[in-house]
Image (tube, rainbow, N blue to C red):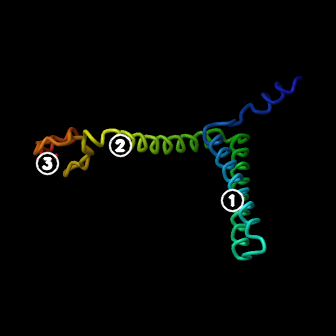
C-alpha cells in the first residue's frame, strides 16, 4: 500500500484540517516569529541592562510556549475523532470571524462615505441609519421600528 492510501485510511473518521486549525497554525507561527524578535531584542540589551534582557527573555519563553501550544492544539484538532465537537468549535470560530469581518466592512464603508453621508442611531431601537450630509433639518424614518424624528444633517 502506498503512503497516500495509508494516510487516507488513518484519517478516516477524524476531523482533519479546518478553518480553526489553519488559524491556529498561522497564529502559532506568528507567535514563534515574535519570540525570535524578542530574542534579538534581548541580545541587544546584553551587558547594558540585565532587567530589560530578563524581561525580553521571559517574553520570549511565553510567546514561544504559546506558539508551540497553538501548533499542538491544531494537531489535536486535526487528529481528533470527536468530529461533532470539533465541527461545533469550528462553527463558533467562523461565526465570530464573520462578526469581526462584517464590523470591519461596515467601518470601511463609513469611512468611504464620510464626506457624503452621516451615520446616526434611532432613538427608539438604536438601529444605525445613514442620512445625507448638508441637507439642513430633515425628517428621518427608521426602517426597523418606523420611528420618525427630525435631525440636523
Closer to the eye: label 2 or 1: 2
Residue 141 figure quarter: top left
* Dots 1, 3 in contact, CB < 8 A: no
Cα distance in 3D space between marks 2 and 1 = 35 Å
Residue beneath the point at 70% across and 40% down: 78
User: Element under label 3?
Assistant: strand
Which of disc 3 and disc 1 is earlier in sequence?
A: 1
Number of residues whose C-alpha sits closer than 10 Å to that of mark 3, classed few (under 14), some (14–19) or many (20 or more): few
Q: Position of residue 153 (x, y in %)?
A: 17, 45
Q: Position of residue 103 (x, y in %)?
A: 41, 44
Badge 1 is on which residue? Answer: 63
Which of disc 2 and disc 3 is earlier in sequence?
A: 2
Residue beneath the point at 73% across and 49% down: 72
* Dots 2, 1 in contact, CB < 8 A: no
Residue 34 figure quarter: bottom right
Cα distance in 3D space between marks 3 and 2 = 21 Å
Number of residues whose C-alpha sits closer than 10 Å to that of mark 2, classed few (under 14), some (14–19) or many (20 or more): few
Asked if residue 66 is positioned above or below residue 11 in the image, the reply reads: below
Residue beneath the point at 72% across and 46% down: 76
Number of residues whose C-alpha sits closer than 10 Å to that of mark 1, classed few (under 14), some (14–19) or many (20 or more): many
Badge 3 is on which residue? Answer: 151
Badge 2 is on which residue? Answer: 111
Amino acid at each position: 500500500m502506498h503512503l497516500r492510501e495509508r494516510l487516507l485510511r488513518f484519517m478516516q473518521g477524524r476531523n482533519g484540517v479546518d478553518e480553526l486549525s489553519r488559524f491556529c497554525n498561522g497564529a502559532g507561527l506568528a507567535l514563534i516569529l515574535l519570540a525570535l524578535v524578542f530574542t534579538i531584542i534581548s541580545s541587544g540589551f546584553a551587558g547594558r541592562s540585565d532587567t530589560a534582557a530578563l524581561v525580553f527573555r521571559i517574553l520570549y519563553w511565553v510567546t514561544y510556549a504559546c506558539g508551540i501550544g497553538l501548533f499542538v492544539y491544531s494537531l489535536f484538532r486535526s487528529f481528533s475523532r470527536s468530529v461533532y465537537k470539533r465541527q461545533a468549535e469550528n462553527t463558533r470560530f467562523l461565526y465570530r470571524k464573520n462578526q469581526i469581518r462584517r464590523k470591519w466592512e461596515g467601518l470601511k464603508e463609513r469611512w468611504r462615505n464620510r464626506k457624503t453621508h452621516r451615520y446616526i442611531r434611532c432613538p427608539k431601537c438604536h438601529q444605525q441609519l445613514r442620512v445625507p450630509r448638508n441637507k439642513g433639518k430633515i425628517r428621518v424614518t427608521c426602517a426597523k421600528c418606523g420611528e420618525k424624528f427630525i435631525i440636523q444633517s
